[in-house]
Amino acid sequence: MIRVWLTTAYYELVKYGRMKSVLVILIGLPLLLILLLGSAFDTDLKPAKVALYVADQGELSGSIGEFWNGEAIKPFVFVLKTDSGQEVEDYVTEGIADYGVYVPADFSQKVLAGEKAVWKTFSGRYAEKNVAADAVIGRYMAELNLKFAAMATLGTDAPVRIGNADARRQSLVAIGNLGNTEDRLFGETSAMQYYAAAYLIMFLLFSGMSAALALLGQKEDGTLRRLYAMPSSFRAAVFGVVTGAVMLACLQSLVVIVFTKYVYDVEWSGHYLAIAAVCLLTTAAGTGLAIIVASVAGTSKSTQTLFTILVTTMTFLSGGMMAGIQNMVGIASKLTINHWANISLRAIMSGSDAAAAWNAIGVLAAIAAVLSLIAIFRLPKVVMRHA
Amino acid sequence: MPSLHIAAHLIRRTMGTRRGLLMNVLLPAAILSVMAGLFAGLQGGKPVIVVNNADAGPLGAYLAAAVENESLYDVRRETDWDEQAVKDAVEEGGADAAIYVPTDFTQQIAGGGDTKAILYRLDEQLWNASLAMLLEAETSRLAASASIVRGAGGGGTADAGMLAEFVKAQQSPAVTADNVSMKLGRVLSEPMVIGLMLMFVMLLLGQTIGFVLEDREKRTMARMFTAPLRAIDIAVGNFAGSLIIGSLQLTIVLGLTYFAFGYAPGIPFGSMLLVLECFLLAALGLVSAAAGLVRNRTQLQQLNTLIILPTCMISGCFFPLSMLPDFIQKLANFMPQKWALQAIDRLGGGQGIGEIGLHLAILVLFAAVLLAFGAAVLRPNRT
Amino acid sequence: MGLITFRDVVKKYDTSLIVNYLNFKIEEGEIFGLLGPNGAGKSTTINMLSGLLELSGGDIAVDGRSIRKQPLEVKRRIGLVPQELAIYETLTARENVTFFAKLYGLPGKLLRERVDEALRFVGLLDRAKDKPSTYSGGMKRRLNIACAIMHRPKLIIMDEPTVGIDPQSRNHILESVRELNRLGSTVIYTSHYMEEVDAICSRIGILDQGKLIAVGTKEELKRQAGQAERLVFEIDRRDEPALAEMEGHPGVKRVEESDDGRTLIVTVKDSPSILQDLLFIIQKHGIALRQLTRIEPNLESLFLQMTGRTLRDE
């Protein structure tokens, strides 16, 4: 009995090993998606890329250069130096830069002559980046203007410094952040952690499907009947096929976690036992769901289509494709396997709230148990020809 | 003539059945339209900022006006809210951020005191960090002005009238930033709808080429070739068939999203279709070249999953390309999707067909090169 | 001049010679059987004839037209029934036949007539609106034939048309081949089943390792191989003198005897009066003849003799 079980499981694994394209999809694709989405949504605060060309060689050019190279603006803008005013415009048009600034050649001259002087600015596509760049430029302009206004209205020629450069003074704006971390786009985790969890879970569910597909495939090929005809436990053999897929999922989790940890620097935190529990429960839930779907769909082709649609939808609803969706769809998100698996993984990663993690794992375990039970009940429909 | 029959035959197999029509035409159109609607809703609103200026003096109004001048925000002025009411508005979602200017603001600034304008927000994001910076810059300027006025007056408190006048004098500054209005499309920054459309074009072509591959697999293509026609007739037939199917799908999907569901990116229907047609050519090249690498339909589906989704991502179909690391942005130049998105973006920015000639040429070049590899799939092999 | 002429036909893949200088003719009105084990070059030969493969050397002429110079004219005269079921499962039988008919450029009214004719011929007219996915294996095979004959080709090539089907459908197909031949088509027929070829073919070519090792009518081939008929006599008792007399007859090669002596297997040389002579000997010795069976030389053993291999199970 044990021998039959282990033998079938082993040969299942060998078969998966031969299916190179399946392995690439199950392991390579999540790694690629994690990299792309994780780095795209890396941090919320990305400086605006500003294409800059300073044609002015006059007296103010020194202070202009100092301003653009200064530390104070670093969090808000990243300067891309260009070689002409036209290039600044092109950068913005092509989307290489988010914003453009062109300081005309006669700027210093006009300012010192007391004439109206301008910087030409080019707003780009992203309103929030335009505002950031506008604010940065506004600060420089304000300083200059203040100086000239002081000369004109008050006749003073005192040196003027604005803002935080005046070390004695504290900020005159108090900022209250009212939201708790739940409301943040990626919660307490980074984007990379967020997507690493989301795609590990999504593809674990797909691995669960391979159990159902293997059973259906073996039924369609007739090899399952051969197993049935053998003087050994059929249950053990079927269970072995399922075990093969579970082992594939284990291998997949291992590769994805180790790879993301060492190559993408994803912090999984040290609670590997809890992570293993989440992976196993997710695989169990996925396998159960896939077997239920297979018992309804009948053929491997329609099982594949149905299950893919199901998993994709669940991933989407739980925010795996666009973070934040889960908060817009309300209860629908909570009805997915991904949701509970994701939040338990994220809670484990952030390490802050052990109770929340175990709570979510508990819900996941309940889902996995229910799905597995139904699956066992429906299994004959999948493996027998006329059940 | 035989090519025509082969093309018609391919069309019938792809969308001639009820299932084909549903899966290959109506469903994509519906999904795209729902997405278009969803994103139009998502991207509609500006952040709402409640500003309550309780300041007795003139400087608070000055600060409020500065925020109001920023067109990015939807500013709502309130007059008799207290700090708690402002805070509640943010917490309960009535506003995205709120600013409260305390009653003694002018007085404190003038006296060099330590007053603070208060900004409430849920968490830090670039738009509200910018708002904070704007407030910071304005208050700093007011404080600096006050300090200068104080210096000029020689007293401990700046003269309020003088300060107001001084601040007013700065209203027409000598040095300004002159914003050159750029005509920019919104596609590169919000690519989801167009990006999905491009992805569907590729997925549907994968379906179509799948049928051609099935022809090779099941030897029906060989059978066609025993009829009195040349290999080129079959290739042309399959090529034309795929293009016609793609065009029909595009026209229907685009027509539905444009006219039935009211997605209007501000681009003329014809120009949009032209760019998408060029993309269709390039995508046909890509998919048939991929088909040349595989033996059967199942493998083609797997390969398509592996090729289409990641290339769409790195060429900016789902989120702006500028969010990705630089090397990926360079890589994107080798994806036809990037050029299609850029061309559509330019159209959206008000440019004409003439100005996207280069983009279209690049797409056609993609098609030419890739079709050279993929042509083997479209005709029977003769070795 | 035959309907089909193979002249120095060669097919090479890289360095290996798949078809090695074929030279033979097929006359109009024949049912020509092409025999050979797997890998002998049958399919390659047929694919070259039907324009699916290019020739590496030589030429094939059909009805006086060269496959190299006028491939379309040659194809117009040919209907190929491929070994695979090259039909569309998702299209109805009529749509299948119609599609291929269109590729032959048949115009509207004629097209409909010919499609009906082809479907009627294979007995699928009443099921023409159904999709092949609802058909039995034999019906699919018949549809596979219908798709190759609606343009009334001069030459019909059947590549293993009876693989894997029930005896009833098989008989139907064999009958169709004879019928098509009667209606004026020349047929080239390949099969693994010797008895099929034996039953319907007027002339046979045997292909082995890319070479045509024998060609002719069945009788010619048997003669060529030096094989003779055998006569099996079942008699009521053993009789030594009769046996000796038989063995002494100039038309008899060999006489084998069963253990009880009641069955005699007589291998005879080709001689018209031999059966009469042997019957006379039996009668003369007062032996009662229970049964007489004539065993003709079969192609299977002929093939074995010529190539040292069997046709199947390779």
Image (tube, rainbow, N blue to C red):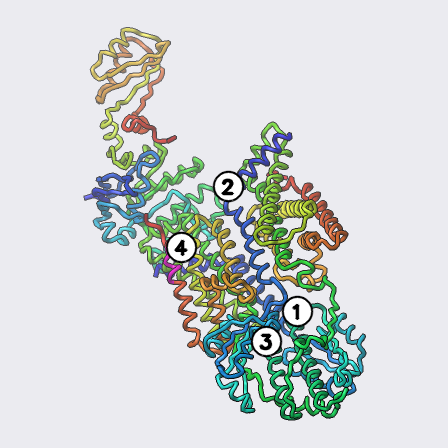
The residue that mark 3 highlights is: A133
Query: Is any atom of residue B26 visible in this view?
Result: yes
Residue at 44%, 73% (x, y): give it. B356
Q: Are marks 4 and 1 on the same chain?
A: no
- Give the x, y percent position of residue C264: 32, 14
What's the amino acid at mark 3? Answer: Ala
Q: Residues within 10 Å of mark 2 (few under 14, many from 20)?
A: few
The residue that mark 2 highlights is: A18
Give A238 or A334, whichever is nearer the viewer: A334
What kind of secondary structure does the magenta stretch mostly adopt? helix
Which picture quadrant has residue C36? top left
Instruction: Kindly check if marks 4 and 1 are in contact, taking CB atoms under 8 A apart as contact.
Output: no
The quadrant in which the N terminus of chain C is found is top left
* Mark toward the viewer: 2 or 1: 1
Q: Residues within 10 Å of mark 1 (few under 14, many from 20)?
A: some
* Residue C6 lies in the magenta-colored region: no
- What chain letter is assigned to the residue under label 1? B
Q: In the shown orientation, is residue B274 left or right of residue A347?
A: left
The residue that mark 1 highlights is: B125
The quadrant in which the C terminus of chain C is found is top left
Give C43 or B70, whichever is nearer the viewer: B70
